[in-house]
Image: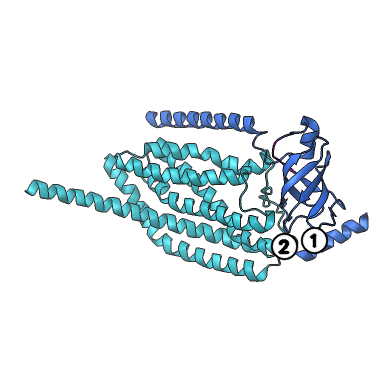
């Protein structure tokens, strides 16, 4: 009965994920393209930063997805630990690599912006250091997943790690409030923004675009993992049949 | 059903413990993790003499003096509570200007002034096109 239950869920998931992947992917690509065009060609430069301000259309979405990725891993880990949902750790596994990639992109674009604006590529301030830590935590998670697979674990240890790593998220978010940092404070709130509307608007396109793109990548990776597990199970069964037959 | 609830309680308790531990660790770090001293901190806690520190604040209006040698300058850093005179020799970043944020790396002198070896411009969270910035500047000067 239990095995039936575990099988039913991935099947229902695949029924949803398969048709959802291409539209998410292409919507993401189109939104990013429009946002980048708007950000490069249609918005005015900033009064102080000049043209360097335009990196924000990439930097902010990558920062958001680097952090949203870990939120996803934390929620998946919780779901796995408490409800033993079979898809949960597959989702966490699928998020790890794109999440790490976006965290790295966030650090790289920030550094490129920092050189002309602050006059330095890197400083050990609260925001920069905590974001770098998140990137390392991603790498650790991927290593731990692999180690757990090697010793035939059930994913419980990576799940605990995924949950514990979420303490970094509020630290990154509030680092600019708690400590005086080189990084500026929050520009965009829920209701108001300190970025002028003429500069801000392409950001909504790149933000939603990168989010759709990220979701499409995660769905693709989840489908790959599921397909691989299925193939492995079939191979094992075939090997068993051969053994029995011989 | 029972085991599920047990696991949920366990996870929530563990999260609360880890969260509490990090809050304690962070509040203990509060002073050490600051990226720079503000002039007000120095006034309150005394001069951190004899070691390399960072001083951060706003460059006071009309305070930048460039010296005749072409590479040295003096300016005043303020945070609204106190002010610190700074001497610097070298190349300042493009965004270094009056009434704008700065972080100076260097050390304090016994007389309370600061000798900087490197300057970083601190950008604030406001972004706007040049036309609007110009207008704001105008209205402000009109009022004064």
Q: Secondary structure at mark 1?
A: helix
Nearer to the camera, A24 or A232: A232
Kindly indicate the quadrant of the structure image that contains residue B69: bottom right
Closer to us: A100 or A164:
A100
Residue B90 placement (x, y as % from top left): 74, 54
Above or below: residue A158 compared with residue A103: above
Q: Which residue is mark 1?
A: B133
Q: Residue sitting at 34 percent across and 55 percent down?
A: A224
Q: Chain of mark 2?
A: A
Instruction: Characterize the local packing of mark 1: few (<14), some (14-19) or many (20 or more) Cα atoms within 10 angstroms.
Output: some
B53 magenta-colored:
yes
Q: What crowding class fits label 2: few (fewer than 14 Cα within 10 Å), some (14-19), or many (20 or more)?
A: many
Model colouring: by chain
Q: Indicate whether A78 appears above or below A230.
A: above
> Which chain is depicted blue?
B
- Looking at the picture, how far across and down is residue A203, in whole percent? 62, 60
Point 87% across, 53% down: residue: B62
As drawn, B134 above or below A71: below
């Amino acid at each position: 009965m239990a095995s039936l239950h575990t099988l039913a869920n991935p099947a229902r998931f695949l029924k949803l994920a398969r048709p959802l992947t291409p539209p998410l992917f292409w919507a993401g690509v189109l939104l990013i393209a429009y946002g980048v065009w708007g950000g490069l060609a249609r918005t005015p430069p900033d009064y102080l930063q000049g043209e360097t301000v335009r990196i924000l259309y990439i930097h902010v979405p990558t920062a958001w997805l680097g952090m949203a990725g870990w939120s996803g891993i934390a929620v998946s880990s919780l779901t796995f630990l408490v409800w033993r949902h079979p898809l949960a750790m597959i989702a966490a596994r699928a998020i790890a690599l794109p999440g790490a990639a976006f965290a790295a992109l966030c650090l790289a674009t920030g550094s490129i912006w920092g050189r002309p604006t602050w006059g330095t590529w890197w400083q050990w301030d609260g925001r920069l250091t905590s974001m770098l830590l998140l990137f390392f935590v991603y790498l650790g998670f991927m290593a731990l997943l692999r180690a757990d697979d090697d010793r035939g674990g059930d994913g419980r240890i990576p799940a605990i790690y995924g949950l514990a790593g979420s303490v970094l998220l509020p630290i990154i978010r509030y680092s600019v409030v708690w400590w005086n940092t080189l990084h500026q404070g929050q520009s965009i709130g829920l209701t108001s923004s300190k970025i002028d509307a003429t500069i801000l608007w392409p950001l909504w396109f790149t933000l939603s675009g990168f989010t759709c793109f990220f979701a499409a990548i995660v769905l693709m990776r989840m489908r790959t993992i599921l397909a691989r597990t299925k193939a492995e199970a079939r191979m094992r069964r075939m090997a068993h049949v051969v053994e029995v037959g011989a | 059903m029972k085991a599920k609830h047990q696991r949920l309680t366990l996870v929530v308790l563990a999260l609360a413990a880890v969260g509490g531990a990090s809050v304690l660790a962070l509040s203990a770090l509060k002073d050490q993790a600051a990226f720079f001293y503000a002039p007000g901190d120095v006034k309150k806690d005394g001069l951190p003499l004899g070691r390399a520190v960072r001083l951060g604040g706003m460059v006071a209006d009309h305070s930048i003096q460039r010296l005749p040698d072409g590479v040295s300058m003096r300016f005043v850093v303020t945070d609204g509570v106190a002010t610190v005179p700074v001497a610097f020799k070298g190349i300042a970043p493009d965004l270094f200007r009056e009434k704008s944020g700065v972080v100076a790396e260097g050390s304090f002198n016994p007389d309370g002034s600061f000798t900087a070896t490197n300057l970083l411009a601190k950008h604030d969270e406001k972004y706007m096109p040049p036309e609007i910035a110009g207008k704001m500047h105008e209205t402000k000067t009109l009022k004064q």
